[in-house]
């Protein structure tokens, strides 16, 4: 079902300043793409970047929240302490 939703397209209408449309058109020509495909690509890339940033932040917050536990756990598993290895 997720694959089906990923390929379902919905039409939306947005208003953009003329200067943005001009830049989109110029870039679309440069990369040999349609304006619509370029916009889809740029939005997808932006969303993926935002998702990555959110995941990294969640991981950082989780690490910071569990730092004390992680530090103590590392001591328990450090079998090489004092072994000269």
Image (cartoon, rainbow, N blue to C red):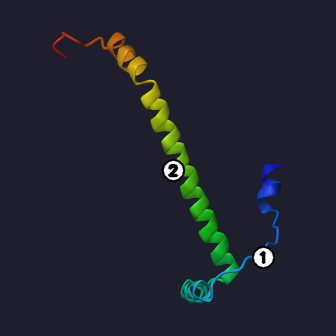
Pinpoint residue 71: horizontal percent, then vertical percent: 35, 19
Residue 34 drawn above or below residue 43: below
Figure label count: 2
Q: Is residue 22 left or right of residue 71?
A: right
Q: Which residue is mark 1?
A: 13
- Viewer-nearest of discs 1 and 2: 1
Q: Which residue is mark 2?
A: 53
Pinpoint residue 34: horizontal percent, then vertical percent: 67, 83
- The quadrant the C terminus occupies is top left
The foreground one among 1 and 53 is: 53
Mark 1 lies on a secondary structure that is: loop
Residue 15 drawn above or below residue 56: below
Q: Earlier in the sequence, mark 1 or mark 2?
A: 1
Badge 2: residue crowd in 10 Å (few <14, some 14–19, many ≥20) = few
Badge 1: residue crowd in 10 Å (few <14, some 14–19, many ≥20) = few
The foreground one among 62 and 19 is: 19
Pinpoint residue 42: horizontal percent, then vertical percent: 60, 70
Q: Is residue 4 left or right of residue 60?
A: right
Instruction: Using the rendered view, name the quadrant where residue 68 is placed.
Output: top left
Residue 3 drawn above or below residue 74: below
Who's the residue at 78% across and 76% down the image?
Answer: 13
Instruction: Using the rendered view, name the quadrant where residue 28 is placed.
Output: bottom right
Q: Is residue 45 left or right of residue 9?
A: left
Who's the residue at 61% across and 59% down the image?
Answer: 47
């Amino acid at each position: 079902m997720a694959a089906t939703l990923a390929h379902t397209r919905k039409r939306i209408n947005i208003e953009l300043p003329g200067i943005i449309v001009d830049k989109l058109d110029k870039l679309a020509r440069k990369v040999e793409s349609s304006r619509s495909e370029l916009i889809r690509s740029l939005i997808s890339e932006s969303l993926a970047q935002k998702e990555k940033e959110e995941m990294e932040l969640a991981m950082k917050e989780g690490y910071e929240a569990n730092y004390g536990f992680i530090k103590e756990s590392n001591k328990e598993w450090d079998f090489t302490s004092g072994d000269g290895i």
